[in-house]
Image (spheres, rainbow, N blue to C red):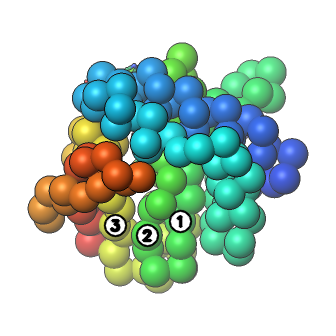
Amino acid sequence: MPIRPYTSIDAAAAGEIFRRAIAVIGARDYTLEQVAAWAGPEGTAERLHAWLSDGRLALVAADAEGRVVAFGDLEADGHIDFLYAAPEAAGTGVVSGLYDALEDAARAAGMARLYSEASEAARRFFLKKGFTVLHRRDFAVRGVAIHNYAVEKRL
Ligand SMILES: CC(C)(COP(=O)(O)OP(=O)(O)OC[C@H]1O[C@@H](n2cnc3c(N)ncnc32)[C@H](O)[C@@H]1OP(=O)(O)O)[C@@H](O)C(=O)NCCC(=O)NCCS
């Protein structure tokens, strides 16, 4: 599965993956009210593009036809802010390859630690990649109570 840097031509695909990943995969562990708050209002795709093109490392995984099916990022301090897969690509190993590329880049940059705030599905994924759960985080997004987990991996 080819992995390459995110560019502006991927913006629409990333927005679509973000929305579908939350609606389909997120809905397994979170209520409809929670996934709606997580996905955010109209315009989130534009904000997503602004984040992914702000200088951080952002990678996409494409299928054999070149269609983007997952994306993820790595900030300069080792923070992984985004890791999202199209539902049909989730569970196939695509995200594993994408994550490995992010970790390789972190090691190459001399980072000592990777960390994230992981949803339930992401927590299960990160545990398989050697992360440790530090604590559960309970907070509100757009007025809706939700939770995730602070996770980290020492490199
Ligand atoms: C987090 C994510 C990128 C991990 O990628 P992945 O390919 O699904 O990783 P895994 O195969 O290890 O699956 C992790 C968990 O996701 C869930 N999952 C995977 N594929 C799924 C699918 N098609 N439908 C519903 N849930 C699915 C499973 O609960 C799985 O846990 P399990 O293997 O212990 O049952 C992906 O699940 C995703 O996009 N989730 C929704 C968005 C999200 O939560 N992003 C992280 C924000 S912090």
Give the vertical position of 36 relative to 107 (above or below). Answer: above
Q: Position of residue 114 (x, y in %)?
A: 36, 68
Question: In the image, what residue type sits under mark 3?
Answer: Tyr
Q: Is residue 110 above or below residue 19?
A: below
Cα distance in 3D space between marks 3 and 2:
5 Å
Where does label 1 land, which residue? 74
Lower position in the chain sequence, tag 3 or tag 2: 2
Which of the image's four quarters has the C terminus?
bottom left
Q: Is residue 102 visible to the viewer in this orientation of the structure?
A: no
Asked if marks 3 and 1 touch (Cβ < 8 Å), the reply is: no
**Marks 2,1: beta carbons within 8 A:** yes
Q: Which mark is residue 79?
A: 2
* Mark 1 surroundings within 10 Å by alpha-carbon count, few (fewer than 14), some (14 through 19), many (20 or more): many
In the image, 45 versus 54, the foreground residue is: 45
Q: Which residue is pictured at 25% across the width and 48% down the height?
A: 145
Asked if ligand 1 lies within 8 A of label 3, the reply is: no
The image quadrant where one finds ligand 1 is: top left
Taking the spot 47% from the left edge, 26% from the top edge, the residue there is: 23
Tell which circle, 3 or 1, labels the residue nearer the N-terminal end: 1
| 100 to the left or right of 127 | right
> In this view of the protein, which residue sits in the foreground, 26 or 72?
26
Image quadrant containing the N terminus: top right
Residue placed under numbered mark 3 in the picture: 115
**Which image quadrant for residue 68?**
top right
Q: Is residue 8 above or below residue 134?
A: above
Left or right of 116 on screen, residue 21: right
Mark 1, secondary structure of its residue: strand
Q: Tag 2's secondary structure?
A: strand
The amino acid marked with disc number 1 is Leu
For image coordinates 78% across by 39% down, the residue present is 12
Q: Are marks 3 and 2 in contact (CB under 8 Å)?
A: yes
